[in-house]
């Protein structure tokens, strides 16, 4: 184990890591931060399988406190075995790097994992995030899409950055589990999906079609893509018009609406169930 | 309009309202705070229909800034028509009373709306929150249960207080839409539901039964209750044993689990759909 420990938050290297909390620097360097042992473990595992990684490690550098290095020795060993430079840092430095209130002592610098739209193939279930602004919501939808067996999640250019720390944490590792596309327009995303034979629905609280009726009439049995919109105002009309129609989750009680992540979960799982029926 | 305006955060009345942010005082006075025009509107509407209100108003007092009073004149009129004392407060006082970072200028003091378990009748769909600790999650599950047409939501004594400000906000008014029961044990909640002919399932990521198989085998067609557990560790074995079985939302992709509110949404909506099939 290297005996050197970074103890100064003024170290150029530490400052270089710290600034990845900002989108501008993430995009310039195509790197982002992953916090906590579980998420870092998923990032290390992704190095072997990620479509973006192409046999090189997703994790580029690992930073951990002495205590975390002891507690997560498996993780440090795995990082070293993959040739990932591993650095010990003081508690002060960890607090400076971490974006959480109670840091878990482990942070990885990772290379971007998104793939170009053209590299995505064989889509049975897709989620498109259009104008989703809250990183926690976006990460939760990514995690749910992964759980529901989606083949791709597309973040349009009008949505939050999937490499935002809150989004990475809310995704609970799912960012590393399936192909993620970023920065395309909603129009390009929908056109691509339809080109590869996917029926595309707009999830919209004001939609004229009822999700359960759409499911019952076998319109979710084949390849399906869902476009999810803004938390407050949904989807712009010009995006809805590109799709096969606006579908709403039925409201049987007194609630006026569902929150975005909840509605997305119901749409994605209703589809996953239909697609797997005998 | 009364010309008096509360401008001091040291006023005994304002201090009396402020302390309702704490559970101890809420429980002593059986009063809680509702923030924002939309939620207050729902609380006022609940006065007419709530099973707990019995023709008296749920809203006991209204506090608003001069600006908010102008902007939401409909709301102030409705409050006065219902005989609710309405008080103008300065921006400083509003900031002191509000629990949000950007207060919307309207706060109501409301009486508790929960009902005793024995008053709940005719249950087709129920949600039981057992050991749910995050108020945002609890409020989201309450909102989703309402949307899915649940007849009752039960907060056990091991769960977060539904009158917590974050829970009230996340519920988006649903606290006023359907009977809510608080403070019973999980055992009493499950026993009550089974007594009135409800089949009770434990939602558990480690459950041996697959939600979609349970649905396909018509086991969600009749009256159903769902017990949801802790965000991190799920449900204690002794609670699961009281139910008809532990059911998990199937994970088709690489995600290890779903978050609590997402899993609850899938369970509740899968049930709502089954119950409404021809």
Image: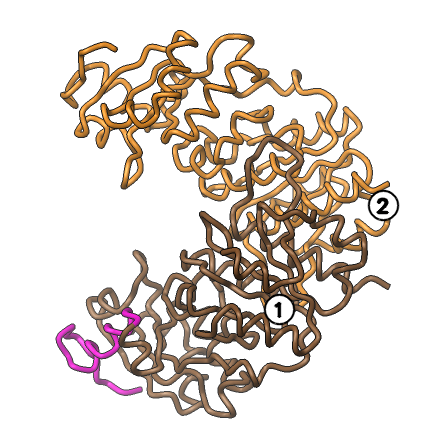
Chain colours: A brown, B orange
**Residue labelled with disc 1:** A126
SS type, badge 2:
loop
Rendering coords of residue A79 (x, y %) = 42, 84
Toward the viewer: A242 or A146? A242
Work out how far the residue at label 2 is from the one at label 1, CA to CA, in angstroms: 29 Å
**Residue labelled with disc 2:** B218
Q: Is label 2 or label 1 in front?
A: 1
Asked if residue B206 lies left or right of residue B218, the reply is: left
Rendering coords of residue B271 (x, y %) = 73, 43
Is B65 in the magenta? no
In the picture, which quadrant includes the C terminus of chain B? top right
Asked if residue A87 lies left or right of residue B152, the reply is: left
Asked if residue A104 lies left or right of residue B16, the reply is: right
Asked if residue B97 lies left or right of residue A145, the reply is: left
Label 1 Cα crowd, 10 Å radius (few <14 / some 14-19 / many 20+)? many
Q: Is residue B102 above or below residue A38?
A: above
Rendering coords of residue A192 (x, y %) = 60, 76
Q: Which residues are magenta?
A: A1-23
Rendering coords of residue B136 (x, y %) = 45, 42
Label 2 Cα crowd, 10 Å radius (few <14 / some 14-19 / many 20+)? few
In the picture, which quadrant includes the N terminus of chain B? top left
SS type, badge 1:
strand
């Amino acid at each position: 184990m290297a005996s050197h420990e970074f103890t100064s938050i003024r170290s150029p290297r530490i400052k270089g890591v710290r600034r990845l909390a900002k989108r501008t620097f993430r995009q310039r360097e195509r790197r982002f931060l992953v916090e906590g042992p579980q998420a870092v473990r998923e990032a290390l595992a992704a190095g072997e399988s990620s479509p973006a990684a192409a046999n090189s490690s997703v994790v580029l550098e690992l930073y951990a406190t002495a205590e975390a290095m002891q507690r997560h020795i498996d993780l440090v060993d795995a990082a070293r075995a993959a040739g990932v430079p591993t650095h010990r840092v003081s508690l002060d430095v960890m607090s400076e790097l971490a974006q959480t209130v109670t840091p878990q002592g482990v942070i990885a610098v990772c290379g971007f994992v998104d793939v170009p739209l053209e590299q995505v193939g064989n889509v049975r279930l897709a989620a498109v995030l259009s104008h989703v602004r809250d990183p926690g919501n976006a990460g939760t939808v990514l995690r749910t899409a992964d759980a529901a067996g989606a083949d791709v999640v597309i973040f349009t250019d009008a949505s939050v950055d999937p490499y935002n720390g809150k989004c990475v944490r809310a995704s609970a590792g799912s960012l590393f589990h399936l192909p993620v596309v970023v920065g395309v327009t909603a129009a390009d995303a929908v056109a691509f999906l339809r080109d590869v034979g996917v029926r595309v629905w707009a999830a919209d609280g004001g939609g004229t079609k009822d999700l359960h009726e759409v499911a019952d009439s076998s319109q979710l049995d084949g390849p399906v893509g869902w476009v999810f919109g803004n938390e407050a105002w949904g989807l712009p009309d010009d995006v809805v018009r590109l799709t096969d129609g606006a579908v709403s989750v039925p409201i049987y009680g007194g609630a006026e609406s569902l929150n975005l992540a909840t509605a997305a979960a119901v749409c994605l799982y209703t589809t996953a169930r239909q697609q797997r029926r005998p």
